[in-house]
Image (tube, rainbow, N blue to C red):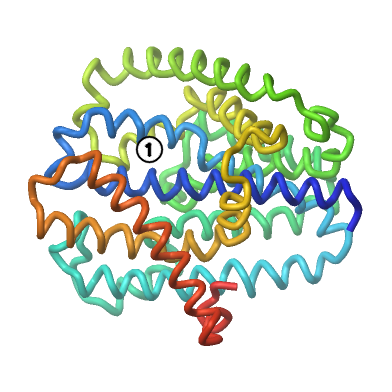
Amino acid sequence: MSDAKANRVTWVDLARGVGIILVVIGHASGGVIDSPLGSHAIALRWIFLTIYTFHMPLFFILAGLFVADRLAANPKKFVTNTFTKIARAYSTWAIIQFTVIYMMGNALNHPATGPYLPQLISIIWQPVSQFWFLYALFFMQIFAWVAVPRIGATGFFALAAVIYIALQIFGIPNWANTPPVGEFCTFVVSFGLGVAIGPHLAKIKALQAPSPILPFLLVLLWAGLYALAYIFVTKRLGANWISRDLGANIAFVANGWEFYPAALAGTAAAIFACCANVVPLRTTFEYLGKNSMPIFLTHILFIAGARIIILKLAPTVDITLLMVLVSVIGIAGSVGFLEIAKRVKLAKALALI
């Protein structure tokens, strides 16, 4: 592996580490917002909106970075890995998590109702909870496998941008208007951007020797774009929209076109911060980045379990303390589970590695 390649992987792992922390905090926030405490969690709603403006575009851009190189090197291996890694992880943990959700019943914010088996079968076309990300990523990689060798990485990005713009202008036809289609169309442009940038990473001087000032300038840009987007959205939805909506509705707004310029600025700020060595606890973030997939697969179980137990034991717990405890348990529990699974040689069977 060349030095450039090694540096590239290091900052990508750091960025994934930052991203998975944001994912855990975002899901912990969403759980509290949708709980009985949610009506009082105004600050938490702002944190939730802030995270959701860019953390998923960040992950999709990172997911696309090495697609063109891998397709050029071995397209058969690329598509095989799409099935053996992404599809297998999705099917394994969607089944596990849905089964737990079904068994927990009304203890959860959003319990599963109705017969178990038909709902379990429906995960084939209706992703469970956070696993929509893997579902969308699977089809994006299949899309790239078909398109990139024929139209190139830049052409793929252009096609993805057309899909995204068409979604904003025309919406999705009623016959195809399902969450998986909407999520694919919403985030394929970020994935496509990663695919287009990937082959040129070594040539981007700002990534190889970035100024430590650049991330801070990008944060300022993000803040300005974020404020403009919020003003625009508030004119459309009303002054108190953020204080009354459920987490899923706030996330939907955050992923809208109004916030996409802020998403790009926030993603760039995170990436350049990782390249410029301004991220603290680098070893920890790099470890979390390397293990972002198993953490992603299991963290909801730990977050939801911790929240339920804490609220049972202390119904009037301070929201800030609850958030800290749930987020820490979500990360620590997932990491601990992964390490135990490795130790007893079950990590591969559980699709964690």
Residue 104: percent from the left, percent from the top? 19, 70
Residue 265: percent from the left, percent from the top? 60, 25
Nearer-the-camera pick, 303 or 151: 303
Query: Which quadrant is the N terminus positioned in?
Result: bottom right
Task: Tell me which amino acid carries mark 1.
Answer: Ala
The answer to whether residue 81 is left or right of residue 104 is right
Residue 121: percent from the left, percent from the top? 38, 75
For disc 1, the marked residue is: 251
Nearer-the-camera pick, 222 or 228: 222
Residue 139: percent from the left, percent from the top? 60, 58
Can residue 164 be spotted in the picture? yes
Residue at left 32%, top 12%? 235
Q: What count of labels does the image hold? A: 1
Query: Which quadrant is the C terminus positioned in?
Result: bottom right
Give the answer, above or below, for where 126 lies relative to 38: below
Residue at left 80%, top 46%? 7
Q: Secondary structure at mark 1?
A: helix
Nearer-the-camera pick, 348 or 169: 348
Residue at left 60%, top 20%? 216
